[in-house]
Amino acid sequence: MQTERVTFLTSPDHKAALDAFARASGMSVGHMLREASSQYMAEAPLGDDDTAAALIAELNEAVPQMRADIRAAVAAIEAANARVDAILGADKPAS
């Protein structure tokens, strides 16, 4: 296997964390970073079209429940208003 060198800059704290994690995992930092980057690339983040499609699907599921919740809240507010009006109306002297 032919290899090439990759260099990146990081803070001393991050480098120490990489060293500690690699040591605890029984790997070199290079091996750990190769593994991590391979896994990251294999996950293939969603493209814009895929992200939009996923959001639309979630909205299509969520919106009907949101509408039902809003209708229930409005009905509860109207019922509370009617109870308050009834109580306040009962305290008024007849005209």
Image (cartoon, rainbow, N blue to C red):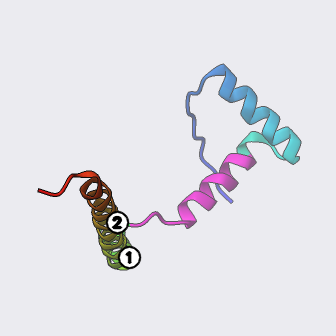
Q: Which residue is drawn at 38% across and 76% down?
A: 65
Q: In this view, does 75 lie to the left or right of 21?
A: left
Within 10 Å of the Cα at label 2, are there few (<14), some (14-19), or many (20+) other Cα atoms?
A: few
x and y percentages locating residue 71 in the rendered image? 30, 73
Q: Which residue is drawn at 66% across and 28% down?
A: 14
Q: What's the mark number on residue 40?
A: none
Q: Quadrant of residue 73?
A: bottom left
Q: Residue at x 59, y 27 (%)?
A: 10
- How far apart are the alpha carbons under marks 1 and 2? 12 Å
x and y percentages locating residue 79 in the rendered image? 32, 67
Amino acid type of the residue tagged 1 in the rendering? Gln
Q: Is residue 19 left or right of residue 79?
A: right
x and y percentages locating residue 87 in the rendered image? 32, 57
Which SS does the magenta portion mostly show?
helix
Considering the numbered disc 2 on the image, is that residue within a helix, a strand or a loop?
helix
Q: Is residue 58 above or below residue 84?
A: below
Q: In which quarter of the image is residue 69?
A: bottom left
Question: Residue 49 or 95: which is nearer the viewer?
Answer: 95
Considering the numbered disc 1 on the image, is that residue within a helix, a strand or a loop?
helix
Q: Does the segment drawn in magenta span residue 42?
A: yes
Q: Residue at x 57, y 35 (%)?
A: 7
Question: Residue 54 or 81: which is nearer the viewer?
Answer: 81
Q: In this view, does 27 lie above or below 80?
A: above
Residue that badge 2 annotates: 73
Q: Earlier in the sequence, mark 1 or mark 2?
A: 1
Q: What is the span of residues highlighted in magenta in the rendered image?
A: 31-46
Q: What's the mark number on residue 65?
A: 1
Q: Where's the N terminus, which quadrant?
A: bottom right
Question: Residue 25 or 48: which is nearer the viewer?
Answer: 48
Q: Quadrant of residue 95?
A: bottom left
Q: Does the segment drawn in magenta span residue 17?
A: no
- The outermost residue toward the top is 12
